[in-house]
Image (tube, rainbow, N blue to C red):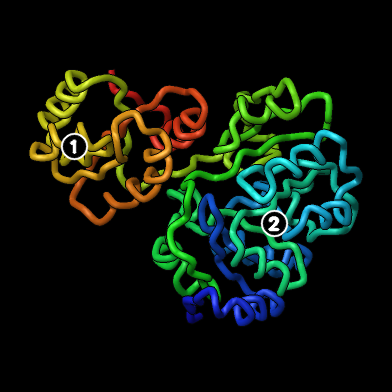
Amino acid sequence: METIIYRPSDVLKAAQKIQQGELISFPTETVYGLGADATNEAAVKKVYSAKGRPSDNPLIVHVSTIEEVEQYVQEVPEVAKKLMQTFWPGPLTLIFKVKDHVFAPTVTAGLTSVAMRMPNNEVTLQLIRESGKPLVGPSANTSGKPSPTTADHVYHDLKGKIAGVLDDGDTGLGLESTVLDITDPKLPTILRPGATTKEVLEKVIGTVFVDRHLISSEEVPKAPGMKYKHYSPNEPVIIVAGESEIWQKAIKTYLQQGEKIGLLANQDLLNQFQDTVTAAYSLGENKNIHDASRRLYSGLRYFETTDATLILAEAHEKIGLGEAYMNRLQKAAGNHFFD
């Protein structure tokens, strides 16, 4: 299959491919998604096949307006209305109780709930409108690998497996949306942290809980990213927390073990150590979590083009956006810290 790169002016052509049951990767403010008609079971199954994604991992459904949600869910509680009015379009996914038979069965992985969001990208909103259908949109990468933040990342992973990529440049945030379970409106619970932080949510709806329990092999996760290894490059990742003395010790340790080190850290650390390692990628200014989050996946992918055999990656405090950053980095590293 030829994978076509579509420009924003080609959105009608891309929408026609969706209508024909094909897969189109689309841009969002978080990462690139892999789009298919959420009501077409054959098309949705192609998503799992293209990604190599486990079929018990549910998919997020993307809509172009707030009003569409009522067509697909059993109820829109008051808490959901407040959240959608405040944060949509944007990086917040809400989990509702789903109506029967409105989506392809594979979308919900057998659950009685569905995850939905309205992305903050006008090209993709137009794609959804022109397709005339809600679109599933998991990250457009090989399952388990770092999510794509450019069309080139998508093309690298899925060339020949999908019909096309709608290229609208780099994504802005670089980490997937926050997933908030509101199936019990009295217990809104974050299942996956993202740019819409707990602190921001609580300003709108009051107390928000965080689910940090580990998913067992028998459980079906209610949201993506909860069960399987995610965001991992080909090279092992080790997280380093601390100032330059700790980095110096870590680099010395792994050089002595014969590793070719890839350094994924802020620019100040790169200025100190990049001459002693095999490859380096900047996460931006020191202690700038927004820079680090936006560059994390590109950085993890970068080292696949180098001779690095090991990646040393910078930790951040789990405050605000740092919670989402560390959630992704710890999964990429298998929770392996240097100590």
Residue 326, numbered circle: none
Q: Quadrant of the C terminus?
A: top left
**Within-10-Å neighbours for mark 1: few <14, some 14–19, many 20+:** many
229 relative to 72 in the view: left or right: left
Asked which quadrant contains residue 250, the reply is: top left
Q: Residue at x 75, y 44 (%)?
A: 84
Q: Nearer the viewer, residue 118 or 97?
A: 118
Asked which quadrant contains residue 126, the reply is: bottom right
Label 1 – label 2 distance at C-alpha: 39 Å
Upstream in sequence: badge 1 or badge 2: 2
Q: Which residue is mark 2?
A: 62
Q: Relative to 128, is 199 above or below?
A: above
83 relative to 226 in the view: left or right: right
Q: Residue at x 61, y 63 (%)?
A: 122
The percent coordinates of residue 154 (x first, y second) are 45, 63
Q: Nearer the viewer, residue 69 or 105?
A: 69
**Within-10-Å neighbours for mark 2: few <14, some 14–19, many 20+:** many
Q: Residue at x 63, y 67 (%)?
A: 46
Asked which quadrant contains residue 8, the reply is: bottom right
The percent coordinates of residue 252 (x first, y second) are 12, 26
Name which residue type carries label 1: Leu
Q: In terms of secondary structure, where does tag 1 sit?
A: helix
Residue 270, numbered circle: 1
Cβ atoms under marks 1 and 2 closer than 8 Å: no
The percent coordinates of residue 246 (x first, y second) are 21, 19
